[in-house]
Image (cartoon, helix red, strand yellow):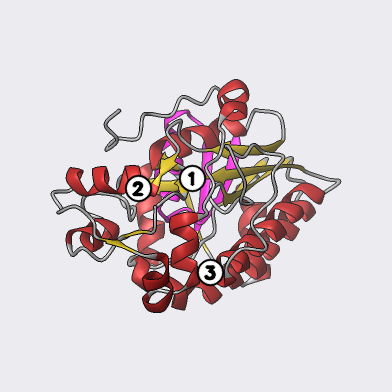
Amino acid sequence: MKVFVAGASGAIGRPLIAELVRQQHKVTGMTHSERGARQLVQMGATAAQASAFDARAVVQALRRSEAEMVIDQLTSLPRDPAELAAALPGDRELRLRGGGNLYRAAEASGIRKYIQQSSGFFLKAGTGLADESEGLAIDASKAVAASARMYAELEERALRSERMEGTVLRYGFFYGPNTWYHPEGMVADQVRRRQFPIIGQGQGVWSFVHIEDAALATVAALSAEAGIYNVVDSDPCAISLWLPEFAQSVGAPPPPQVSEQEALDTAGEDAVYYATKLRGASNRKAIETLGFRPRPLQWLNR
């Protein structure tokens, strides 16, 4: 199968390219950098060096690839999560405007299926695990709501086409190599410095997914029924449970605990939302339809 991946040199782009090549797909990866292009060639893919903001270049790259499928993994997130707030406007512009160029080019080029990255952790607050019928948390705290609205727009765009099949993959928090949640990642550094506290009761439920499992599910989605899938592991758990065990796994002291009011005063409403209101997601559909078999959350002792 001929597959075009945008955002091919990002955190999920690299393991995704590796898995597509391993499964003998003909892969073209789009990246804006020369370094990224060299890496793609070394991995066995064809490199298309282009900016997603250059609509003409995107059309040309996509047509040269002769792709049947497009996977949109465009992101612009910082290496350090402490810089996330400053990076979010640029990330939003890339996903919406740059991704819009990609989407329109795909429609014009006769692409059969369009796969869109979305979020499996900004789902509408509620009880129990959220399935794919649940909407996004567009009424959450300010920054969470802004991200949720962005993902909702991306999902609507991917699913509305009358020319292409649209599939949305709602990934959990990525962990594993080259992610924040890795022993060498920036969250591990924050935890070692005791800068990642449990807020209040820490009842917010997080869904993670190993980056390589996410790549496997994405490749499986190429030949699966179109629609929305929660690509998350089978161990959604409250921050009060996973954070101390993550700290132990990276050789950090136990995380501090602060009240919700203290966190509001020092870190803001979004930090409190993450800690107390995030809702985990059910992966039943991905297991049944994609053959998804996520590994257990690696640092969790159950």
Per the image, the residue denoted by label 1 is: 172
Per the image, the residue denoted by label 2 is: 240
Q: Is residue 125 magenta?
A: no
Residue drawn at 42 percent across, 55 percent down? 9
- Label 2 near label 3: C-beta < 8 Å? no
Per the image, the residue denoted by label 3 is: 91
Q: Position of residue 164 (x, y in %)?
A: 78, 44
Residue drawn at 27 percent across, 38 percent down? 299
User: Disc 3 or 2, which lies upstream in sequence?
Assistant: 3
Crowding near the residue tagged with mark 1, few <14, some 14–19, many ≥20 C-alpha atoms within 10 Å: many
Count every numbered label the image shows and give the total.
Answer: 3
Range covered by the magenta-colored residues: 1-30
Could you tell me the amino acid type at mark 2? Answer: Ser
Q: Position of residue 106 (x, y in %)?
A: 72, 53
Crowding near the residue tagged with mark 3, few <14, some 14–19, many ≥20 C-alpha atoms within 10 Å: some
User: Disc 1 or 2, which lies upstream in sequence?
Assistant: 1
